[in-house]
Amino acid sequence: MKNNNIVVKNASLDYSDYYAQKKISPETQRKFVSSEFLAIPARYGKNEFYFAQETIDFIKFCRNHSPEHSFDVLADDDIEIRSLHSFDIWMPIIFVASNVLLPIAINIVSSYIYEKMKGREKEDANVDVTFYVKKEGEEKYIHYSGDAKTFRDNFEKIDLNKM
């Protein structure tokens, strides 16, 4: 499914290369089961993994603004950030444990974008964010790349239950 700036497709998450390369502990690997929302790294090249530049700030924001939900990062120690120098908002890849939590994730990302844009409303900025969502035993990939100001509006135009 494709709608304006949103792409939805079936996916399969396999982080075994990341686990081996970074010597990720079994406890950390279980975060896929124990966390409602989990920031995961993106693969660059064959064996390079980086977190998006907004990862740490976003997780802190989530923990402060939605303490009733569990937010974590798929890492044991320090994380490697890929910095991209622009006003664009490069969000982490967000694993969402259940499709019923997806509207909450979208709302939190929307609130984060709103906070980032405060005082800079006249500037143009794009958002790049990917969600991996568990739905009925399958995983869905949902990617948004587009205008920060219309992030929420774009998601309101699609029926998330039919993805």
Image (spheres, rainbow, N blue to C red):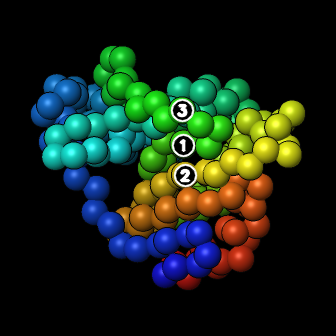
Front residue of 124/3: it is 124
Q: Which residue is mark 1?
A: 91
Could you tell me how many numbered marks the image carries? 3
Identify residue type, mark 2.
Answer: Asp
Dot 1 or dot 3: first in sequence order is: 3
Residue named by callout 3: 85
- The first of marks 1 and 2 along the sequence is 1
Secondary element at tag 2: strand
Is the residue marked by circle 2 packed among few (<14), some (14-19), or many (20+) residues within 10 Å?
some
Front-lying residue, 134 or 4? 4
What residue is pinned by disc 2? 128
Q: Position of residue 93 (x, y in %)?
A: 45, 47
**Cα–Cα gap, marks 2 and 3:** 14 Å
- Disc 1 residue type (three-letter): Met
- Whether the residues at callouts 1 and 2 have beta carbons within 8 Å, the answer is yes
- Tag 3: amino acid: His
Residue 103, x across and y down, in percent: 66, 60
**Image quarter of residue 50:** top left
Asked whether residue 55 is in view, the answer is no
Does residue 70 appear left or right of residue 30 in this picture? right
